[in-house]
Amino acid sequence: MNDDAAPEPRRRIAFLGPEGTFTEQALLSQPDLAGEELVPMATFAEVLAAADSGEVDLGFVAVENSIEGTVNVTIDALALEHELLIQREVVLGIQLCLMARPGVAISDVRTVHTFPVAAGQCRQWLARELPGVEVVAANSNAEAARLVAESADGTVAAVAPSLAAKIYGLEVLATDIEDHPENSTRFVLVGRGPVPPPTGHDKTTIVVFQRTDRAGSLLAILQEFAARAINLVKLESRPTKKALGDYCFIIDLEGHLADEIVADCLRDVRAKVADVKFLGSYPAAGEQSSSRRRDAEAAWRQADAWLQAQRAKLSG
């Protein structure tokens, strides 16, 4: 009789395909995820829908680029459409290349296929080096490379990662074509839960819906974080899609829901607004810089102990 335990089934993780996207590269950079069953999908919207419905166990999507900013389709879907929690974030440096079928020169190019976010990252380069070129949107950079590889048109090219050129048999005509050298994209792993335990270097993401658009309402929210020395990594407004002028706020903050100071802050924020949607507490990418939050947490504990001591003086 074999007492060996059966191996754990591989998790299904959806990502933006086809093979060769930056999303896939970022996903493969995570050793514990690279060996799972990776499922390419055509759009970020499809990835999130599959994760929410249970078709896959997890989804992996881009949320922000250092040049183009927020990937709105992802943020809006997480905030307004799905009940998913962020499990971790991954930051990947982005290098864009112009590529075409063998034998095509830059001077031949009249049409460039690329993902819209990538097009924004190299807008100035395209205008300078390929004035008048037609930019055609593709579902992903790798999809753009695949379309060019399958085309018999000698005037088309793609903006995509160098890996896509190798996969689809294209030649790289130019490298590092992004307009700013420090180009990176932030990706998140999302699922139906649970929330990962705190690591000491975490982020929390929430969506804040205001009751009314009144003077000082945003300041009242921000004061809750400032009073506790909680650093806000990101703050932006997004339309709720209900009415013109009706906005919600997406907030990334340092800390974890398990941190008492963060929990206390979110409780008070929730008391002041119409609703708070929790999008997750998760390990943060990059260098650890949690000493300020630890100091704030210690101060909160001391203040709470003082308050409890004062309450103990109340008569029964």
Image: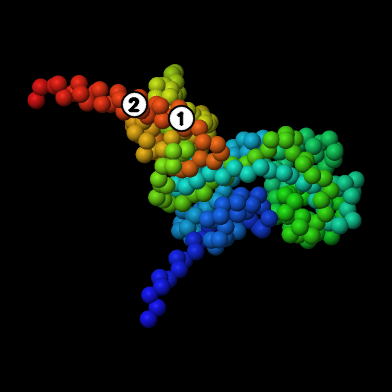
Q: Height in image: 297 above or below 38?
A: above
Q: Is residue 92 left or right of residue 128?
A: left
Q: Position of residue 17 (x, y in %)?
A: 63, 56
Q: Residue at x 63, y 38 (%)?
A: 65
Q: Position of residue 298 (x, y in %)?
A: 36, 28
Q: Residue at x 25, y 22 (%)?
A: 306
Packing grade of label 2 (10 A; few <14, some 14-19, many >=20) is some
Q: Is residue 49 left or right of residue 143?
A: left
Q: CA distance from mark 2 to mark 1?
A: 14 Å
Check disc 1 and report its element: helix, strand or loop: helix
Viewer-closest of 54 and 3:
3
**Residue denoted by label 2:** 300
Q: Position of residue 231 (x, y in %)?
A: 47, 28
Quadrant in which the N terminus is drawn: bottom left
Tag of residue 291: 1
Q: Residue at x 39, y 26 (%)?
A: 296
Instruction: List the single residue furthest toward the left.
Output: 316
Discs 2/1, front = 1
Q: Height in image: 115 above or below 253?
A: below
**Earlier sequence position, callout 2 versus callout 1:** 1
Instruction: List the single residue furthest toward the top.
Output: 215
Instruction: List the single residue furthest toward the bottom.
Output: 1
Check disc 2 and report its element: helix, strand or loop: helix
Q: Is residue 18 left or right of residue 36?
A: right
Viewer-closest of 231 and 251:
231
Packing grade of label 1 (10 A; few <14, some 14-19, many >=20) is few
Q: Residue at x 59, y 39 (%)?
A: 64
